[in-house]
Image: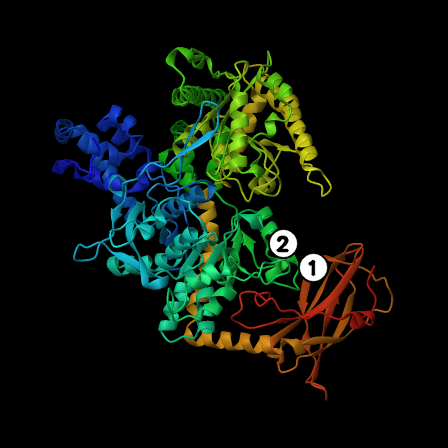
Amino acid sequence: MKAIRRFTVRPVLPDPLRPLSDLARNLRWSWHTETRDLFQSVDPERWAASGGDPVRLLGSVSPARLTELAEDRRFLRRLTTVADDLHDYVTGDRWYQAQSGELPAAVAYFSPEFGITAALPQYSGGLGILAGDHLKAASDLGVPLIGVGLLYRHGYFRQTLSRDGWQQEHYPVLDPNELPVALLKEPDGTPAQVTLALPGGRFLHARIWLAQVGRVPLLMLDSDVEENDLGERGVTDRLYGGGSEHRLLQEMLLGIGGVRAVRTYCRLTGHPEPEVFHTNEGHAGFLGLERIAELSDDGLEFDSALEAVRAGTVFTTHTPVPAGIDRFDRELVARHFGPDAELPRIDVERILRLGMETYPGGEPNLFNMAVMGLRLAQRANGVSLLHGNVSREMFSGLWPGFDPDEVPITSVTNGVHAPTWIAPEVFRLGARQIGVGRAEDAFSGGGSDRWDAVADIPDQDIWELRRTLREQLVTEVRERLRASWRQRGAGTAELGWIDGVLDPDVLTIGFARRVPSYKRLTLMLRDRDRLMDLLLHPERPIQIVVAGKAHPADDGGKRLVQELVRFADDPRVRHRIVFLPDYGMAMAQKLYPGCDIWLNNPLRPLEACGTSGMKAALNGCLNLSVLDGWWDEWFQPDFGWAIPTADGVGTDPDRRDDIEASALCDLLEQRVTPRFYERGPGGLPDRWIEMVRQTLTLLGPKVLAGRMVREYVERLYAPAARAHRTMGPDAARELARWKARLRRSWHAVRVDHVETSATTATAELGTTLTLRVRVALGDLAPDDIEVQAVSGRVDPEDRIADAATVPLKPAGGPDTEGRWMYEGPLSLDRTGPYGYTVRILPAHRLLATSAELGLVAVPSEDVVEGAGVLMR
């Protein structure tokens, strides 16, 4: 019989054990070994059955066992120590509190998904895991962050396989009362709520669940409340599900409802109000509209409020392709805003213009969330150096007239939260070398000098550690593979072969990630005979562990999964290659440490960053990857291999895949496997161990989320906080009026004449020329603009590379026609083909960058003809 109603019955902990409840509700246990060890000792069997989830564990422990523990002095001493450690962690000063300068009182960090722990399955892939690592690292560093997301009742899907290897999706219902979260409540005990207005006089209500991530509160909005109609209750049903209106409502709830949730949380707890709002991808971009509406209610007109909001907003883009951006039909967006819906006091046309693709090739009837995110943020970044370059190219149409390298999008390379991703055995080896405290500091983002201690670890210890981790992975794989085959319908008698799957002494390669086509799950299958030879080599075999989920709507991705599964089912190789379904955090934490090689072969440059290889590297796993994302930035032959790419413009896609697959096999045959299997005088693979050592020493400090968050604080959050404080109502009005005046008058701004003191087409290095430029400014004054000389080496098409800019100064007042003469020096500081040009840019003390308005005036063709000679 099916129950008509479900309850969660919580255990009553004896008074001496009450701290266990606090420890279970703070997700620091997910990356703090001592806390996890304490919970495991409560009941090892139930701990394993609970999947390492303290909330589920405490809900299943018998009262008799709890009574026994309440009288166990040794356990109580451990409990006191761990509880005191958590108290010190959340209240004591950390890195942030020791910084000088004006840092933000608080930062609100919005993301559609957060991967904190497998016990809170609110993530689908890299974006969510990155967001979770960002929160954890902020907690370790003491950054006053508030996370904001949605609580999905089905999370992301669970993946199984049919007998013939086709991906199947399942959506288990998540009961928030069984998750490590708590309702945010008003002083009278009622649940705190936020409400959005919908078309037709309807409303969308949402409760606020609080997950405590160390020091960082994570607010998660949940629309499954009784006050909503059935349709509205389903808004937060699942991650990245439903049609376009469903997604739009999710993103309105995340952005607009999220700001209201932050205001509610700060009101109820006294937490400082955020001075900086960080939008992790465009999904949360509507937060800027809510903040404009707040300021409009305080008396600021739209343009002034927009400037005030932009000053304190940071936008991070994670996609290198336009297809990865959420775009909505313009009419759909218009219907959900305005007098009969949300933000009624803001003109709908002003909202629509923020998301319009006004650049060449843009779709005028689509509302682009990333475009809105960029227009609402004064600071923006990609997530690796290469991705920063790609993003500047991709969005350059928003800044016409500027070279892509001047587009105001910087980059902060992603990092990963080491305490979450390193195996306990790796931590213990580090702690044995430099002590527990210094090891914790190093892994959470401390100085790189501490990583140098890896040089002193004996080769034998490193190799024994690697074999132990590989052996653990073999055990894990066999258990998961057996469960998968049982689920696929196999009987016990069919599965004896699984006991021989993988070998703890064979070179082990890992490949696990989402399965969009550009990540090329099946590149390794381009030459199956050659792959079989590698898997079955008599002296130097390899074995491969593969995992990954295709999006439920992506049949192409599902076909790739099926192709891989069918190959791995072949009795000839199934002991050497396996596909594990339902890739998630729990699997990943076993997979990264146990692999010797982490394989990544995306289409370059479509991997924005790709952090899985970072997690593997922290465990001494070597990377074998296409030069994309972070690997393009930090690769060295000392600690890994780069797969050559055939990404020329004219290369046929099939031909390109064949070339790169062949290059991958060449590397494995000629470079990778010989190094793993060759032994030195002491019987150890000395050269391999040295690469492991270099991976830990050189990559370890770089790939940390602590390093990443420090960069965000220093390069983005602190400047945004300063700009926010400067951009009070009066300053915002001043800037808005100045921008409006500049846009009205810019058509009259031009370069009339350019001349230099050069008389020949050659000059000696170190020569300084005098440059004179006559400009027309129309209604503007010299204070409104800056005239620049731009110079540098030129290519055969006379394009300036590595440009240097020098401001020119007015020489006297305007002439009788109102034109101004500017002059200044032009230093020839490099040899070879050299060129210059001049340009006029807007200039104002409150601009973050001179490209901010996308306005520039350059010489016309007839002016160029008389501008003197190009230096060669």
Residue at figure coordinates x 24%, y 56% from the top left? 192
Q: Residue furthest right?
A: 760
Q: In front: 209, or 723?
A: 209
Name the amino acid, label 1.
Answer: Ala
Mark toward the start of the polypeptide (2 vs 1): 2
Question: Relative to residue 685, is residue 491 drawn left or right?
Answer: left
- Which residue is identified by label 1? 803
Horizontal and vertical percent position of residue 196: 33, 60
Looking at the rendered image, the disc whose residue lies closer to the viewer, 2 or 1, is 2
Q: Tag 1, which secondary structure?
A: strand
- Colour logic: rainbow
Horizontal and vertical percent position of residue 435: 38, 33
Question: Relative to residue 616, is residue 807 drawn left or right?
Answer: right
Residue 393, label in figure? 2
Q: Residue furthest bottom?
A: 816
Crowd rating for badge 1 (residues with CA inside 10 Å; few <14, some 14–19, many 20+): some
Residue 764, label in figure? none
